[in-house]
Amino acid sequence: MTTNPQSTTNKLSESSINISDITRIMRKYGVYLLGLALLGGTLATIWAKFQTPQYDAETFVHLDQHSSISIGSGGPSDEYGLKMMTQIIGFQNPNVAVLTMRKLGLQKNLIFNGPTPADLENPVQRDQLVQRFEASLSVSQVPKSELLSIKFRSRSPALAAVVVNTLVDTYLEESFEQRYRSTKDITGYMTTQTDALKGKIQTEQNDLLNAEAKLGILAQSATSDSSLLLSEMTGLLSERVKVQGDRFIAQAEYQNMVNHPDASISSDVPGAGALNGIQSEIASTEAQVSALEDKYGPNYQPLQQAQAQLASLKRSQLDIRSKALKGAAENLERAQKSEQSISDRLQTLQKESEGRAPDTVRYEILKAQYISDQTLYNVLLTAMGTGAIQAGMQSQELNRFSTAQVPGIKSYPNVRVDAMAGTAAGLLVALLIVGIIVMNSDTVQTVDQIEDALPLPILASVPEYKEDLAEMRISDEILPLVTLLAPRSAGTEAYRLLRTAITLMPVSQKHRVISLTSCGPGEGKSTTSLNLAVVLATQSKRVLLIDADLRKPTIAQRLKLPATDQPGLSRFLSDTTVFPEECIQKVPEVTGLDVITVQEVPPFPSELLGQGRLEELLTWARDHYDYVLIDTPPVLLVTDALIVASHCDTLLIVVRIGVAQKRALRRIRQDLAKYPGKQTGIVVNALPHSDTYYGGYGNYRKYYGGKGYGGSGSYYGSGSATVVSKK
């Protein structure tokens, strides 16, 4: 299979964007995440310190998978996992809990039940005590072993040990007693059958002795017909032994199911596996219902669902037990029919043999009958003496492995674990809050969000450099522009990329007029205008920068131009006697860069821009400059930017990461639709270094040659523009 390199690159790119998003969020909200995590850990630690110490007493019980309590089972059980789960649920049975509490008088115990004694005969109080008891009880299988771990938790170490030991004793007694009752009934039935069979054998033995005395030495021989009759009867008697044994076992199983509905069912009975499984599931669901009701009350919806499931399981149990009982009855009926069929045939043969068979044949028949009944008697004795029936009474499948000792170390609370859990919970809550803030935030955080909100080509992405700008300055005389302070920095390279993108744009006129705006204030449009003007001037181009923000002009202040009486843009637009040449100011630091500032802020800027003199100014500027840059107000705050845009060739939208709003970008898309013929593009500002290609080089200042002055990193002597100091 081949892999598409392009798709692989896209996947890696998407992955890196996701990682950078996480990094940015952690950097922005890290203090809150850390604070809530520490708060959660501290609160959990304080809470744990004030909790009452609890102690766990533990004992172990061994479940022998090679024992069996099933009738007719002669080897290891194939359902050991089901038996293990059954025993776990059995230890958690409410009846065992009640018996244990009765033995120890826990309903009157101050530590277990509090100062008010409870009455175990009262159903409500009894159920409440059972729920409290089972909430402190824990039963589980020790991994990779045949051991069950039984734990009981209490404020008193001694009480915990006594309760868990008494619980195990009670359960073993109840388990043995249940098996004893079931086995006793079955054994009684089998004893009755064997006693009857024993009397029959004694009668047959007497008849056989009388026949031998009567015949004496056998002098007669059987005919061929008599031999065939004798052979058939002998075969039938041998077959009857097996059929009668099966009938006795089937009848014992059926009576056991009728008299003991909760007793284990032999695997020979149809549906035995399903019945045992659903009994375990019912016990587990009952424990779940009890826990939910104790914790949340009767109106809790999951409790009602669990109760409905329990009712459904009990209905299924009745149905399956009915089918299993029916199957046991069918097994018994088949065995009885088989036995009756053989008995009928034997009676027929006996009648045929009377009067026509010699005494020797009748003697052989009587002997075969005696041997057959004696064999059946031995089979029943074996089943009762060493077989599975008495094995169920004699064999203890559960055996105590150890006795619980009084614990010396508290199990609850665990301050370290609680502190870690509290810290994790605090961090989780903090992440949830930050996630909600990020999901509901309308501020753009990535380039992808900008592209989704405003589908325009991104001409350049300027990385963050504000913090480094102060370190780069070596003199107050130098303008605070990254293109002057650090010509080899990542920020300057981004403005050069913007310059290249503008140069490659197709234009209808030789000279370009470029308007720069943004959705709102503080996104860096004036900074972008100044730095773009500098990098354009370094190519020996004549550049005119016009400050068209008549409401809040900043260009003169940013360039540190001295106060002067010469007219600015506002006077030119309002006074027809002022010529464009009178408004031009030189920028001493950068050769080739001229500016027109505002000087005076007019009362009605929008009306002033729309009077027509702006077009006259731009026509003159096209004839005298290669590039004309116009710094305009935010487009969504006032209409000035749209008025200026109608006279420009290219419109640049400056979008600052972490400041621009998505809805503002979507709205500006509608305004730009009014100028379908204009070239438009986006300049992404303040992009985190981890989201830029420059971030891969580590310290971008080192990669591009230092702070900016002196040596290979100096601006002086590089490029074609000349930078002049004010000194």
Image (spheres, rainbow, N blue to C red):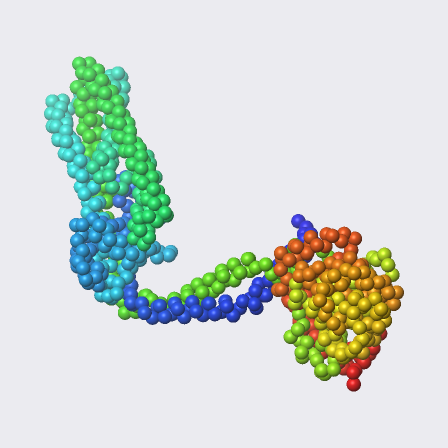
Q: Is residue 187 left or right of residue 513?
A: left
Q: Going 79% across and 77% down the picture, which residue do you hit?
A: 565
Residue 662 image point, x, y percent: 62, 57
Q: Going 71% across and 59% down the picture, which residue do you hit?
A: 639
Q: Is residue 87 left or right of residue 259?
A: right
In the image, residue 367 sits, relative to residue 11, either above or below, namely above
Report the front residue among 206 and 697: 697
Residue 41 image point, x, y percent: 42, 68
Residue 281 image point, x, y percent: 33, 45
Q: Is residue 556 left or right of residue 264?
A: right
Residue 189 image point, x, y percent: 17, 35
Q: Can residue 360 be seen by looking at this rendering?
A: no
Report the front residue among 577 and 274: 577
Q: Can residue 251 be seen by looking at this rendering?
A: yes
Q: Going 12% across and 28% down the picture, which residue do you hit?
A: 203
The residue at the far top in this view is 356
- Say which quadrant the C terminus sits in: bottom right
In which quadrant of the rendered view does residue 261 lie? Answer: top left
Q: Going 64% across and 58% down the picture, which residue do you hit?
A: 664
In which quadrant of the rendered view does residue 512 lie? Answer: bottom right
Report the front residue among 149 and 194: 149
- Mark count: 0
Report the front residue among 177 and 163: 163
The residue at the far bottom in this view is 727
